[in-house]
Image: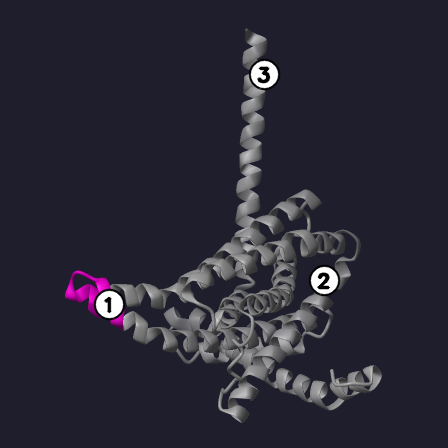
Amino acid sequence: MSGLLALLDDVAAIAKIAAASVDDIAGQAAKAGAKAAGALIDDAAVTPKYLQGFSAERELSIVWRIARGSIFNKLVILLPVALLLSSFAPWLITPLLMLGGAYLCFEGAEKIWHVLHKGGHHAAGEAVGDPLHLEESKVKGAIKTDFILSAEIMTIILAALPTDNTIWFQAGALAFAALGVTLLVYGSVGLIVKADDVGLHMAERGRLGLTQALGRRIVKAMPGFLKLLMIIGTAAMLWVGGQIIIHGLAALGWHDPEHWVELAAEAAAHLVPEAAAASVIWAVSAAIAGVFGLLLGFVLIALMSGIITPLWTAVRGKPA
């Protein structure tokens, strides 16, 4: 009997250790996932455009298909690559992170460039032809876009994890964070794309005048909300992308840009009450990183349109 009790005690101890490990993995994953906020916001802001032109009945089904593709991207493709990098080429993480940051700057600047030069107009009329073929095309396009953003998210999370953990801990934290951010992003997208339908239902079938009025407000507010979400997503891309580049330069040995940002933020903090100093430091740092990201993005647009695209076209012998 005493042997059985000792065994049960050992099992309980192991269970406690396992539970503590799970809690630790979840905690580290949550902290690391928070670092990828900019990419997450942009992911949520970009996805609804792939649902334009489809009936309300197909929207959630399409969101689910894209979410499944996102999980495949993160867990089957990107997770093993991230673990290989962490184990055999950790020195590559910072350059890859900076490459992803440069992509965020490019994407954010390109959105602003289109707004400035085309009045924010994007070609419509895409929902033409066979609906099944169109849906398949849209889903594939969304999953490709998700792959790029997921690669950035996973790299940011990997870089934010403590380096002294075992590969199994890193795998668990990355998997936990990947599932969490996918649920967060596509759960939010599902709520966003169905909000106008819910509002319309409330406006038409609500039993109370207050319910009907709230439904009408939701319907009227959604176009503006989607536009605001896109603006926030663009700003987040530039801020996070610029910040990644600045921190990456410091990690590679050039500390001056990061030091200049810190000096400017601290100087601004001295102009406000002490209670607001921390908020001002964050806001000024984010603003400077965003402006830097925008300028870098415009430089990358010029390089892409003036050098890279013509060279690619010449190599392929046809338009890229």
Q: Is residue 42 magenta?
A: no
Residue 203 badge: 1
Whether tag 3 and tag 2 are in contact, CB under 8 A, the answer is no
Q: Residues within 10 Å of mark 1 (few under 14, many from 20)?
A: many
Label located before the other in sequence (2 or 1): 2
State the residue position of label 3: 7
**Quarter location, residue 178:** bottom right
Residue 79 in percent (x, y) is at: 67, 53
**Quarter location, residue 215:** bottom left
Would residue 259 be visible to someone looking at this image?
no
Vertical comparison of 200 with 235: above or below:
above
Left or right: residue 65 versus residue 93 is: left
Left or right: residue 176 versus residue 212 is: right
Vertical comparison of 131 with 120: above or below:
above
Q: Nearer the viewer, mark 2 or mark 1?
A: 1
Residue 156 in percent (x, y) is at: 62, 62
Marks 3 and 1 sit apart, C-alpha to C-alpha, by 63 Å
Label located before the other in sequence (3 or 1): 3
Would residue 295 be visible to someone looking at this image?
yes
Q: Nearer the viewer, residue 130 or 244?
A: 130
**Quarter location, residue 311:** bottom right
Whether tag 2 and tag 1 are in contact, CB under 8 A, the answer is no
Marks 2 and 1 sit apart, C-alpha to C-alpha, by 51 Å
Left or right: residue 135 versus residue 56 is: right
Q: Nearer the viewer, residue 259 or 123?
A: 123
Residue at the extreme bottom: 117
* Amino acid type for the residue under numbered disc 2: Ile
Q: Residues within 10 Å of mark 3 (few under 14, many from 20)?
A: few
Residue at the extreme front: 130
Residue 93 badge: 2
Q: Which residues fall within the magenta stretch?
A: 203-216
* Amino acid type for the residue under numbered disc 1: Ala
